[in-house]
Amino acid sequence: MEGITEPCFRDLVLARNPALALGGAYTEFVRVVDLALPVWKLREHLGPNRFETPVGLQLMGSDLGALAATAERAVQAGAPLIDLNFGCPAKGAIADCSGSGMLRDPSRLERTVRAVADALPGFPVTAKIRAGFDDDRQLADLARAAEAGGAALLTVHCRTRKEAYCEEVDWTRIARAVRAVSIPVCGNGSVIVHADLERMRRETGAQFAMVGRGALADPWVFSGHAATVREAAEFLLEYAQVLAELHGAKLAGRAARVKQLLRYWTAADLLGPDRASWLRESDPARLFERLGAAGGLEPRTSSSPSPA
Ligand SMILES: Cc1cc2nc3c(=O)[nH]c(=O)nc-3n(C[C@H](O)[C@H](O)[C@H](O)COP(=O)(O)O)c2cc1C
């Protein structure tokens, strides 16, 4: 997820969920405009992966040449999978006819997948769509377009672009996509707790289920481990510490990243009933102290490991 699931966060999640529980992950989208991105940049997004779990690189763009050339470089950078984003609802993406902008035109989506798949014969190129742009009437066409373009797997986020991140979701749309194609489908949308992973697959026939914000709320959602308050606090403090160690993030920057997670966090009910008071906490050092105290940890910590 853009701006959140960068390599530091992902590494902590992968460390807590064995490959059997978490079959694969993707980077946040990497925007491709009109030039191929350099290998070093793509490596940065992939980060070092110390686990067996494959981490694919997601690209978003509408310039077919630049996308295909970037995909080739992503493979050089070590990506085991390339995913194409046809779901981002941001205005910029739509104006550029990339992301969810592509949902208005299945044949263009097909050409985009084909451009990348043809550049990488035999290499798994996957696609992620939403159920449609304004409505879901073209869902089956969009799914078939991705398949016809050469996608090896299709992820279907069951909301339309118009529905953004609405609470109500309709998983029957995922089932419709499953019926429309013969490639494996990965269902996505409102998998909140561990049991939802199996329920989504059972109810939709999708071979895989993808977790979005649920993983920000509970990084153990894939394995189903019920984290203790201590483990929950340790996760957040370790995240801050890794951000300092690897990126030299300053105290305020680390607190801001941790707060991004606190907006969603549910694991071990660490925050108690007053999430707002955590989000209002304007003193970064105090935020980390509070987390340590809530987790029953010795006062140390994340305010200390690096330059403020
Ligand atoms: C802050 C944020 C950033 C996101 N960034 C991406 C992204 O880079 N690529 C992508 O495919 N989806 C992205 N998404 C969408 C999620 O991957 C997922 O499809 C969506 O949140 C629905 O799943 P959920 O209901 O489980 O959260 C993002 C969502 C959010 C909330």
Image: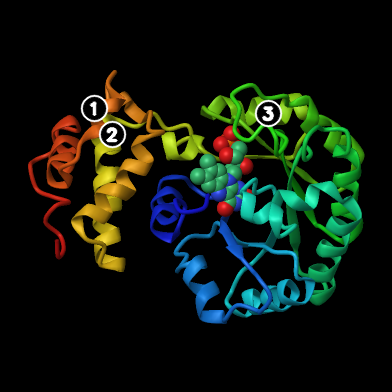
Q: Residue at x 64, y 29 (%)?
A: 198
Q: Position of residue 40 (x, y in %)?
A: 51, 80
Q: Residue at x 73, y 26 (%)?
A: 171
For discs 3 and 1, the disc positioned in front in the rendered view: 1
* Mark pair 3, 1: CA separation: 34 Å
Q: Amino acid at mark 1?
A: Ser
Whether the residue under disc 1 has CB within 8 Å of ligand 1: no
Q: Amino acid at mark 3?
A: Met
- The residue that disc 1 covers is 277
The answer to whether residue 1 is left or right of residue 32 is left
**Which is nearer the N-term, disc 3 or disc 1?**
3
**Which is nearer the N-term, disc 3 or disc 2?**
3
Q: Position of residue 279 (x, y in %)?
A: 28, 34
Q: Nearer the viewer, residue 106 or 193?
A: 106
Whether the residue under disc 3 has CB within 8 Å of ligand 1: no
Tell me, for residue 87, which label it has, or none. Answer: none
Q: How many marks?
A: 3
- The residue that disc 3 covers is 200
Q: Residues within 10 Å of mark 3 (few under 14, many from 20)?
A: many
The answer to whether residue 257 is left or right of residue 24 is left
Q: Position of residue 280 (x, y in %)?
A: 24, 33
Tell me, for residue 279, which label it has, or none. Answer: 2
Q: Amino acid at mark 2?
A: Leu
Query: Is residue 202 at all visible to an observer of this figure?
Result: yes
Q: Position of residue 73 (x, y in %)?
A: 64, 79
Are the two marked residues, 1 and 2, in contact with CB atoms closer than 8 angstroms? Answer: yes
Q: Quadrant of the C terminus?
A: bottom left
